[in-house]
Amino acid sequence: MKSVRIPGPDHPITVEATGGRVVVKSHGKIVADSVRALTLRESDYPPVQYIPREDVDPAMLERTEHATYCPYKGDCSYFDLVVEGSRAENAVWTYENPYPAVADIRNHLAFYPERVDSVEVVPSAV
């Protein structure tokens, strides 16, 4: 049985609209481009950009068998990122049925920054 934990003062998690444009590039190609991204902040980990699936080029994704589990977010699935003939293994992850505390990240994808060229957040013009 998998343990389920609820975010709280000892392990805070917040999900908020990023409030700008998020562009992910790999091998010089735009893989994702969104003004609807969400920023997930978890405990003392670096913030993660979760991009709506519709704003990611599906032709560059290949689902893998790799899977992990987070007691705060749920079961996690992975994709290889295939760009210009190069493959970044398990570079993209998603929680397809996230726990209620982070339900907003459903149908969103996240990228390991070290497996792509860049994950750039461009603030909105005021």
Image (cartoon, helix red, strand yellow):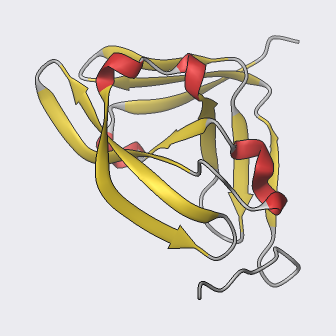
Q: Which residue is nearer to you in this view: 92 or 65?
A: 65
Judge whether 53 appears above or below 103 on screen. above
Q: Which residue is at a point 71% across and 71% down the rendered structure image?
A: 43
**Image x and y of residue 64, in percent:** 29, 48
**Image x and y of residue 100, in percent:** 82, 59
Q: Which residue is at a point 78% across and 50% down the rendered structure image?
A: 103
* Residue 93 located left or right of residue 19: left
Furthest residue to the front? 1
* Residue 118 located left or right of residue 123: left
**Image x and y of residue 114, in percent:** 34, 47
Q: Which residue is at a point 82% across and 56% down the rendered structure image?
A: 14
Q: Quadrant of the N terminus?
A: bottom right
Q: Which residue is nearer to you in this view: 36 or 126?
A: 36
Specify the quadrant of the image occupied by residue 29.
top left
Q: Which residue is at a point 29% across and 55% down the rendered structure image?
A: 65
Count of residue discs = 0
**Image x and y of residue 86, in percent:** 13, 29
Q: Quadrant of the C terminus?
A: top right
Judge whether 105 appears above or below 117 on screen. below
Furthest residue to the left? 85
* Residue 28 located left or right of residue 113: left
* Residue 60 located left or right of residue 42: left
